[in-house]
Image (cartoon, rainbow, N blue to C red):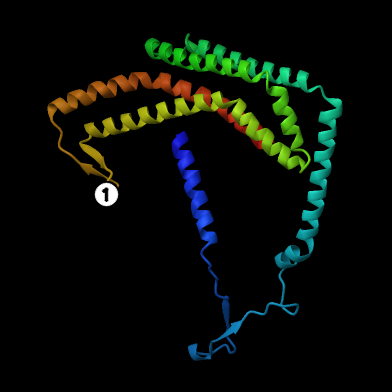
Amino acid sequence: AYACNLYSAQLKALVSLGRLFVPCSLPKRKRYIDTEPTSTDDDMAPVETVDGPHAKLTVVDRLRRDIFPKMALENRILDITLGLLLFCYFWFYTDIRQFSDSLIDKARLLANLLDHTISWLGEVPAGLKLNNELVQFLGLFFRYHIHLFKGYLDLISEYMPCILYTISLTCIPGITCFLSYTLSFSIILLLHVHCFYAYACNLYSAQLKALVSLGRLFAGVKYNPLRARVDSVKTHGDQLILGTLLFSTLLFLFPTTLLYYCVFTLVNLALVLVRCVL
């Protein structure tokens, strides 16, 4: 997924930069005015649009010409003013060392909450009967990542004041720049939560696709990716037996996967809502 996102972003950047070297000019749009109500096609003549002070401007055009530039200037001044006030507050009225320690403690608290959540899922959550072997495997898998995240927090705790000082410098261009850097830093700091959601989502998606494909086996059809349609297929007895075994196994494991998917989706959704507020 990381390699795919990096390749896609780099390819889009290359295409966008390549368009800069290709001169392209769009022709002027022409409108046709019907001079008489009962005129034929021969009476239709192209009339160039008038671009000048005598042109008829709509309300949107007047807003773009008169109001929007002034509002953009006022918003920019307000953005820089709030950014400078926040910069002064960080540098003169805030203990960065204490703030960084508090931030690390909250991150550790979130890791402990995730650990308790995984322990709760390993028991009998809400009276649901789950597969013990799959629950133990997923619990060990996620707990190992939580252990790695705690080691990551211990590593960056020494450099956290320097990172916060650097982020506070972004208040000078404006408060929106500071908020964008804060959002990016929060994504990096809480990367493990997004990884948990990605793991659960991929497992749930793969298991659901397998159940759908095996379910089509009993109906005597299969999906044809070449023509993007469902075609009929002849199946043998051994194929039906193997498909039945796989379908039954995946079906009994599906509630466990669905529960993990729902829990980590809600956690990731809560973080996404916080980022949208920022």
- Name the one closer to the observer, 246 or 174: 174
**42 w.r.t. 114: above or below:** below
Q: Position of residue 19 (x, y in %)?
A: 52, 60
Q: Is residue 126 visible?
A: no
- Name the one closer to the observer, 132 or 3: 3
Q: Is residue 94 visible?
A: yes
Image-quadrant location for residue 176: top right
Image-quadrant location for residue 272: top right
Extreme-top residue of the structure: 123
Q: Amino acid at mark 1?
A: Arg
Q: Residue at x 48, y 40 (%)?
A: 6
**234 w.r.t. 144: above or below:** below
Residue bearing the label numbered 1: 227
Q: Residue at x 79, y 64 (%)?
A: 66
Q: Is residue 255 left or right of residue 274?
A: left
Q: Residue at x 32, y 32 (%)?
A: 212
Q: Residue at x 71, y 37 (%)?
A: 179
